[in-house]
Image (spheres, rainbow, N blue to C red):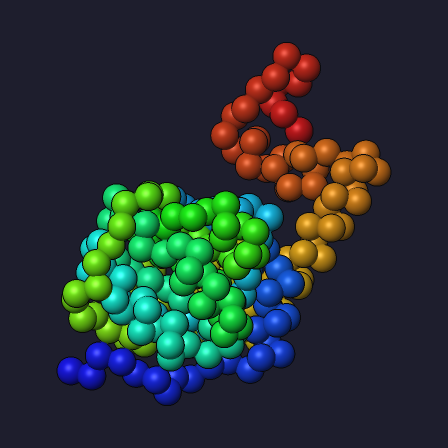
Amino acid sequence: MVNVITRITRAEPADIERLGQFTAATIHEAQGRRGAIASHIKPIDPETSFVGSACTVVCAPRDNLMLQIAIHYAQPGDVLVVAAGEYSEAGMFGDVLGNACKSKGIAALVTDAGVRDTRELRELGLPVFSGSVSIKGTVKETLGSINHEIVFGGELIRPGDIIKGDADGVVLVRREEVAEVAELSARRDEHEAELIRKYWAGGTTIELCNLTEVLRSKGLTSDIDAVVL
């Protein structure tokens, strides 16, 4: 088996950039509530966000050999998505590798394992999302794969798929659906902005969320009306 694949298909940069304007939650909802990565994977700095093409990496638990190789091959704008067995008791990525990523223009690192040197990484400004924080070190012993399909955070991720992350979490978008999902996200943002405007104009949740018939069918009552209308 070829361990390292260097040539992958990426979406159009303009489409990726447009998608990145929307939040992870908006994108998840807009594409039919698909693509949400496991919620325990969170940013070490909630002020950071990112969007980019997935460069997928498989490492053995407590081993960052393939991550170091992936940094070598990754392209500017890529997001390193590192599956390492959800092993929480090791910091497989820290400020030294963070600087290696930042110097190459890598957009972010997302891992189901642990990271360390979080203060230095926050100061560096590289978005880092992880399953844990741990000071324990790693080895460089075991071969894995780069840019193969992986299951990560409950989702199948292909190299070149788009990954967006922010304070609320991480979402996956298929590379061939990026333009469509960006358009759907824009429509959702417009709809929500209109709802907010109507709330401030005096609209109510029952009215604006079309709940009257739902509540009537369920027989919900209040001390004002026999049935909530």
Q: Left of 14 or right of it: where is 158?
A: left
Q: Residue 115: x, y in percent? A: 37, 50
Q: Nearer the viewer, residue 190 or 75?
A: 75
At 74% from the left edge and 43% from the top edge, which residue is drawn? 196
Q: Nearer the viewer, residue 140 or 14?
A: 140
Q: Residue 134: x, y in percent? A: 33, 43
At 62% from the left edge and 60% from the top edge, which residue is drawn? 22
Q: Left of 149 or right of it: where is 9?
A: right
Kindly give the residue lying farthest to the front in the view shown.
96
Say how many tags the image has. Answer: 0
Query: Which image quadrant is residue 220 in?
Result: top right
The answer to whether residue 49 is seen in the rendering is: no
The answer to whether residue 91 is seen in the rendering is: yes
Kindly give the residue lying farthest to the bottom in the view shown.
7
Query: Which image quadrant is residue 160 in?
Result: bottom left
At 60% from the left edge and 65% from the top edge, which residue is drawn? 20
Above or below: residue 162 compared with residue 37: below
Q: Residue 130: x, y in percent? A: 39, 50
| Quarter of the image with the C terminus in it | top right
Q: Left of 134 or right of it: where is 172?
A: right
Q: Residue 126: x, y in percent? A: 52, 59
Above or below: residue 226 compared with residue 129: above
